[in-house]
Image (cartoon, rainbow, N blue to C red):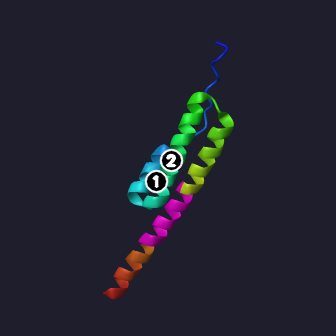
Amino acid sequence: MEGNKPRSNVPTYLAWSIFNTLCCCLPIGIAAIVCSCKADTANAVGEAERAADASRKAKILNIVGLVLGLVLIIIIVALQLSRK
């Protein structure tokens, strides 16, 4: 058991990243998926610091992607309503 590192429990935000990719902002969502996968891999090998860093980046990218997606949807709806 000397070589076994304890698994860290940092959130990966993978589901949120997939949602953002499909529904909000594709480029930022893809970057968030990459960071989420890095966090998951680091969790699996017990690298808590690297996992926490990737998790933090995924969370920030998800927040930015969600906000940009919502702003874009609001702008599109406003433009469509203004045409009528």
Q: Is residue 76 magenta?
A: no
Which quarter of the figure has residue 78? bottom left
Q: Is residue 65 magenta?
A: yes
Which quarter of the figure has residue 82? bottom left
Secondary structure, magenta segment, majority class: helix
- Amino acid type for the residue under numbered disc 2: Val
What is the span of residues highlighted in magenta in the rendered image?
62-73
Q: Residue at x 51, y 41 (%)?
A: 37
Q: Position of residue 62 (x, y in %)?
A: 53, 55
Q: Residue at x 61, y 33 (%)?
A: 9
- Is disc 2 surrounded by few (<14), some (14 to 19) or many (20+) residues within 10 Å? some
| Circle 1 residue | 30
- Amino acid type for the residue under numbered disc 1: Ile
Q: Position of residue 55 (x, y in %)?
A: 60, 45
| Circle 2 residue | 34
Instruction: Pick the residue in front: 11 or 84.
Output: 11
Q: Residue at x 63, y 29 (%)?
A: 46
**Mark 2 and mark 1: span between their CA atoms?**
6 Å
